[in-house]
Image (cartoon, grey):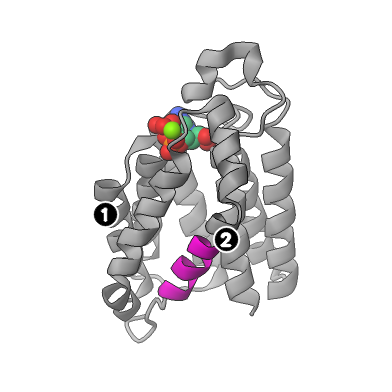
Amino acid sequence: MTDQTARISPFIDAAMALLEQHATEVMALDQAIGDGDHLINLQRGLQALQAEAATLDSLDWPSALQKTGQIVMTQVGGASGSLYATLFLAMGRTLKDQPPDRLHWAQAFADGVEAARQRGKSAEGDKTLMDVWIPVARVLEQAARENWPTPSLCQQINEAAAQGCEATRDRVATRGRASFLGERAIGHIDPGARTSQLLLQAITAGISA
Ligand code: ADP
Ligand code: MG
């Protein structure tokens, strides 16, 4: 798969733009149940990736994902930085020496989510970004198995992400900073779940364009 370069930079640009559009909303969510740095953490990571866009675009997918993971690991602070870095590094490992077909992408995402889940010691229902990532991993696996066309796949990803994000609203957090708030976190969407939903929206828009 060496002839298949990643061309990752349009996704980075789209993610930056969508986060910027929703900056006020994300800041408000994070001020309610986080420490107010989540958006800045993600923006710092995306800026660092933009600075390396030319290199990333020239690599094949496994190498681009590994490099993305390394950049995020070194540049992004907070829980989300290490979780995203873990996701990308594990995805790169799974895709190495595999054809980049639907099945392997689905496997790579599932492996990445599982690695991050272990790192964060979190499960679905803990009111974190995992409440978006885990259902989306299930959609990808089903889509690969059943060979869904791309528009349905993208639609289902966005629906699962929206549901997963919304489901965090009425939960008590058992991981991350919001867990210190106990019942006071109820009624607030988890900021990491919301930004995950936005990032997936940016990616699916790029895939179906
Ligand atoms: P920090 O919490 O260290 O300030 P960020 O503000 O960048 O890091 O990210 C906060 C988000 O990270 C939360 O909204 C939540 O979605 C996610 N998160 C925090 N801790 C965990 C964990 N242990 N497992 C999974 N996700 C987590
Ligand atoms: Mg924070």
Spot the residue most to the front.
24
Figure quadrant of residue 203: bottom right
Q: Which residues are magenta?
A: 9-18
Q: Residue at x 74, y 44 (%)?
A: 163
Residue 189 or 66: which is nearer the viewer?
189
Residue 172 or 152: which is nearer the viewer?
172
Within 10 Å of the Cα at label 2, are there few (<14), some (14-19), or many (20+) other Cα atoms?
Answer: some
Amino acid beneath label 1 = Gln
Amino acid beneath label 2 = Leu
Q: Quick check: 207 left or right of 142? A: left
Q: Secondary structure at mark 1?
A: helix
Q: Secondary structure at mark 2?
A: helix
Q: Residue at x 60, y 54 (%)?
A: 198
Is 67 part of what is drawn in magenta?
no
- Image quadrant of ligand 2 equals top left
Residue 18, label in figure: 2
Would you name the residue on which mark 1 appears? 70
Residue 74: percent from left, percent from top: 24, 48
Q: Which badge, 2 or 1, comes first in the chain's sequence?
A: 2
Residue 186: percent from left, percent from top: 69, 21
